[in-house]
Image (cartoon, rainbow, N blue to C red):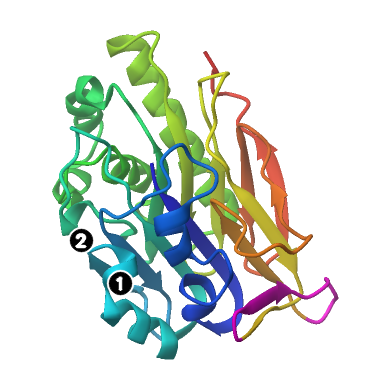
Amino acid sequence: MCRFTYYLGHEIPVADLVTRPENSLIHQSTHAKERPEPLNGDGFGLVWYVPDETEPARFRSLTPAWNNSNLAELARVTRSRCIMAHVRAATSGKFEVAEDNCHPFRCGPFAFMHNGDIPAFSKIRRPLMARLSDAGFASVRGNTDSEHMFALALEHLRGHEHESSCELLAEALHETVTGVLELLDEHAPGTHAYLNLVLTDGENAAACRFSTNPDYIDSLYINQGSRYRCDGEVCWMDEPDDSSRAVLISSEPLNAGPRWKPIERNHVALVSSDRSVSFRELSACSAG
């Protein structure tokens, strides 16, 4: 299990997500409040989009986020209007602590991150890879369930790099979740999947909160307003207005502000390029 944050809005420093808020992502790497184990120290990663570049920049490391001075320096001076940040807790005994296994993952204009687990992934990995094209198979560098799901999502996105939309991204997430459940039904019936996923192209995004376990689902929140701001360690989201919009999606609220709302169980949030948000149930996916 892990913690992550996604941002789309006016340009901000990465530090406004990673180091400055009272419950910043670095704070969550040592004191996560909404998962059984508070530590997330098996690596971290950032993706950020910059003007006139089709592929986002990325910085990953297998060191703990709280102990990486390069991360603090980079976050202080790097600004972007679309940012992904992730701190990793490797699933015990399954996936090694290695840079290739650190999120976010990227391919072309698309980037992806995951909080959760497919406990029976070893039983579905080979049949999942059989569903990939040659390009999809070659894109996988690590051995995590997360990166394999990204490769599955890319099968739906391939050829649409220049015509992406939040609808297309949501469809890709839906196909990914459905595909995982089909494989589990066939190769590991009765096992569960925990799939909090974010997929973006830098202009649009889709994020789902999904679990097949009726007794447990990982936390995921959304915060919408006109502008996200930080003054020192105090961060907040301004009230909505018609002049601008900003969206935050995070495993845990970054601050104590009132605008954080949990995403409903087994729903996907669609974030469009104008930063409006709609929600849709993953109705075609079974929950048992």
Q: How many marks?
A: 2
The reply to whether callout 2 and callout 1 are in contact (CB within 8 Å) is: no
SS under mark 1: strand
How crowded pointer 2 is (Cα within 10 Å; few <14, some 14-19, many 20+) is rated as some
Visible residue check, residue 160: no
* x and y percentages locating residue 207 in the rendered image: 55, 49
Visible residue check, residue 37: yes
Q: Quadrant of the N terminus?
A: top left
Determine whether 26 is above or below 174 in the image.
Answer: below
Query: Magenta stretch: residue 78 in it?
Result: no
Point out the stretch of residues depicted in magenta: 232-243
Q: Residue furthest bottom?
A: 77
Left or right of 19 in this view: 226: right
Res. 248 image quadrant:
bottom right
Res. 134 image quadrant:
top left
Q: Which mark is residue 243?
A: none
Res. 133 image quadrant:
top left
How crowded pointer 1 is (Cα within 10 Å; few <14, some 14-19, many 20+) is rated as some
Q: Amino acid at mark 2?
A: Leu
Q: Which of the two discs, 2 and 1, sits closer to the camera?
A: 2
Q: Which residue is mark 1?
A: 58
Determine whether 80 is above or below 105 in the image.
Answer: below
Left or right of 5 in this view: 279: right
* x and y percentages locating residue 177 in the rendered image: 45, 32
Question: Disc 2 versus disc 1: distance between alpha carbons?
Answer: 14 Å
Left or right of 263 in this view: 151: left
Q: Amino acid at mark 1?
A: Arg
SS under mark 2: loop
Q: Which residue is mark 2?
A: 62
As rendered, which of 12 and 170 lies closer to the eye? 12
* x and y percentages locating residue 35 in the rendered image: 49, 40
At a point 19% along the width and 39% down the height, the residue shown is: 95
